Amino acid sequence: MEAEISLFYKNNKQAKAVANAVSPDNVKIPEGLTIQTVQRGRKFLTSIKCKSNLFTFIATLDDLLGAVSVAERSVSAVKER
């Protein structure tokens, strides 16, 4: 199973902030799961590949989108100051 998520932001700074927030360096992921997140200009791209089960795949997508939502709210809150 594979998924690619592309999100677009108003500027490079916002895209980079969200990408950095959801891409911790020291997280162990289950065997058979690959997650790659990059920022290119105003675009945030995440590729997820899962060789295990559907539950792991869906849970990973849910976790990622939840983390993106929190990061977006944080960026918005800082921007409003």
Image: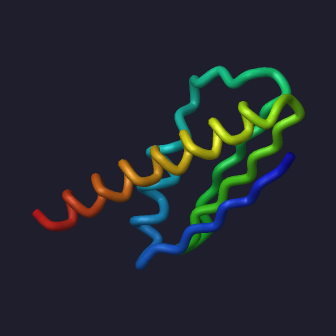
Instruction: Give the farthest residue toward the bottom.
Output: 10
Location of the C terminus (image quadrant): bottom left
Vertical comparison of 36 with 77: above or below: above
Res 46 quadrant in image = bottom right
Q: Position of residue 73 (x, y in %)?
A: 30, 56
Q: Position of residue 25 (x, y in %)?
A: 57, 31
Residue at 74% in and 39% down: 57
Q: Count the marks: how many?
A: 0
Looking at the image, what colour scheme do you see?
rainbow
Q: Could you tell whether 54 is left or right of 64 in the image?
A: right
Vertical comparison of 78 with 1: above or below: below
Q: Position of residue 8 (x, y in %)?
A: 53, 74
Depth check: 46 or 50 in front? 50
Vertical comparison of 9 with 59: above or below: below
Residue at 15% in and 67% down: 80
Q: Could you tell whether 78 is left or right of 56 in the image?
A: left
Instruction: Give the farthest residue toward the front.
Output: 55
Residue at 52% in and 50% down: 65
Q: Position of residue 22 (x, y in %)?
A: 50, 44
Q: Could you tell whether 29 is left or right of 1 in the image?
A: left
Residue at 48% in and 64% down: 15
